[in-house]
Amino acid sequence: MEKLINSAFDFFAYALPGFCILVSFFIVDGDLNTSRDFLKLAGELKVGSGVVMLGLGYAVGFAVTPLGRMLYKWFYKRAFFRWLDRIMAGKLSINEKNEIVDPQGGKMFISDKFILVREFSPLNFKYIESWNVYSLMSHNMAVAGIVAFALIVYKIVVCQPAHQSFWIATLVVTAVLIVLFIYNAIKFNVWSANDQNSAIKVLKMKERADKLDQQEPKKKAAKNIV
């Protein structure tokens, strides 16, 4: 089961977006001008070629992950995102009331939060990881969309294909998908953070961890007495 989860994580977070980036370069092929041309090409691909493309796609997807993260963090700070969020009625913001702070008043490290949820509530940890996978896939797919967008512009301006209307429509659809992918990346990241903080607070994980720390010296002392 663990291997299945890891494989799904790798496929959706890295291999699929990377595969889309590699496939985007077929756009500049002069023989590919309509959707039928691309469907015909897909039908001619052999299983071995597909496996190689997925393998290369995994490496590409892994490499562009920092770019995707920078992209959605930049987008999150823009006024355009707040306008879009009002339209989507997402109300995407971190619930500061549930933010976990340490005794000195600083925020708890994200790695400490992960350890608490993973240790005390594996089911919640599973859902939080799912949100992280969706966020990662979304911002990597946004990078793939930007690559495709640039190549489509090149195709229209430089190659000047016969079916201009098809490529203009594809350009518009790609632009919309880029925005939606970035929005989803933010959405799932916010869901992950809020679920993580809520799980720690509602289930009193910090208090339970502190209690275990206090009990540990007593256990050692009891062993020494025995």
Image (tube, rainbow, N blue to C red):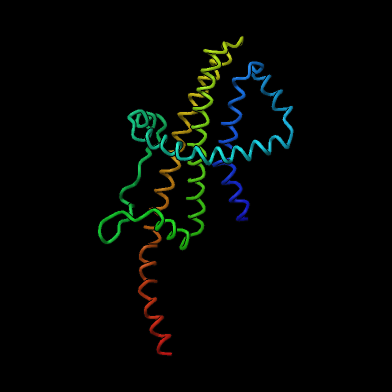
Total marks shown come to 0
Q: Is residue 105 above or below residue 169?
A: below
For the C terminus, the quadrant is bottom left
Residue beneath the point at 44% across and 47% down: 192
- Is 204 displayed left or right of 154 in the figure? left
Q: Quadrant of residue 83?
A: top left
- Indicate the position of residue 44 as horizontal and vertical percent values: 74, 27
Q: Is residue 40 above or below residue 194?
A: above
- Indicate the position of residue 66 as horizontal and vertical percent values: 45, 40
Q: Is residue 154 above or below residue 25?
A: above
Residue beneath the point at 59% across and 37% down: 57
Residue that protrudes farthest toward the bottom in the picture: 226
Residue that protrudes farthest toward the left in the picture: 104
Residue beneath the point at 74% across and 33% down: 46
Q: Quadrant of residue 30?
A: top right
* Nearest to the observer: residue 88 or residue 32: 32
* Nearest to the observer: residue 59 or residue 112: 59
- Indicate the position of residue 2 as horizontal and vertical percent values: 60, 55
For the N terminus, the quadrant is bottom right
